[in-house]
Amino acid sequence: MLAPFPETPAAAAALATATRFCPPALLNHSIRSYLWGAGYARAHGIGFDDELYYVSSLLHDAGLTETFDSHRVPFEEAGGRLAWVFGLAAGWSAERAARAEEIIVLHMRDDVSASEDPESHLLQVATSWDVSGRRPGEFPGDARAAVLSRYPRLGFGAEFLAAFEEQARRKPGCAAARSVDGGVGDRIAANPLDA
């Protein structure tokens, strides 16, 4: 069974925003990222702020979209800043909006432990699984089938790699460039979710 989405005005607005600005493959990736992370949290007894994690999941790759891409700022920082603005517009405190920004930025940094920052940890685990197939043993076949049936990949791997390569070309030294240099293309090609 898929995790239910939070039912708050901010959650609904985040879904509307992601639906409007993300291409379908990226939108589905963002939703899958929430679902993978929420399922992983349940399996490991990790408590987390559901609304905050959902909004961060849906907006985490907004900096890769044509509308919100920055030619100077790494995509995760551009997406984080959008999340901060979004959070304030949704009526969140500046501190809560800053947490969404932090979660999005940290998802492209060194691993964060669940005890230190559960939402960032979940986004790191979920996105690395969805993008490159990291930690396949954490995601049982029935969960995979249910998520992919509802939110198919739609050529996500190739689309995402192209976006990362474009980021790397324009912003050498950014996290996307390090990923490209580190062989993310091979890991995307070998992702069991595309088998």
Image: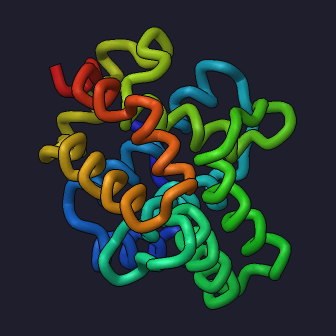
Q: Which quadrant of the figure has residue 92?
A: bottom right
Pick the front one: 182 or 159 = 182
Can the viewer see residue 116 in this picture? yes
Identify the image quadrant of residue 90.
Answer: bottom right
Q: How did the renderer colour the structure? A: rainbow
Query: Up-down: is 32 above or below 173?
Result: above
Q: Please identify the residue farthest to the top as the structure is shown.
A: 137
Residue 194 position within the rendered picture, expressed as x and y whole percent measured from the top left: 19, 26
Query: Where, quadrant-wise, is the C terminus in this rendering?
Result: top left
Q: Position of residue 70 (x, y in %)?
A: 47, 79
The image shows residue 82, relative to residue 186, as above or below, that is below
Q: How many numbered circles are shown?
A: 0
Q: Position of residue 65 (x, y in %)?
A: 34, 72
Q: Is residue 138 above or below residue 105?
A: above
Measured as percent of width and height from the top left, residue 177 is found at 47, 49
Q: Tell me what residue is drawn at x 40 percent, y 69 percent.
A: 15
Please tell me whether residue 90 is drawn above or below residue 141 in the rendered image: below
Camera-side residue of 4 and 35: 35
Q: Please give the name of the residue rendered at 41% of the width and 67% of the height, measured from the top-left corner.
A: 170
**In this view of the protein, can residue 8 be seen by the observer?**
no
In the rendered image, the residue lying farthest to the bottom is 89
Quadrant where the N terminus sits is top left
Residue at 47% over, 53% down: 5
- Residue at x-position 56% and y-position 79%: 82
Is 60 left, or right, of 90 in this rendering? left
Foreground of the two, 152 or 78: 78
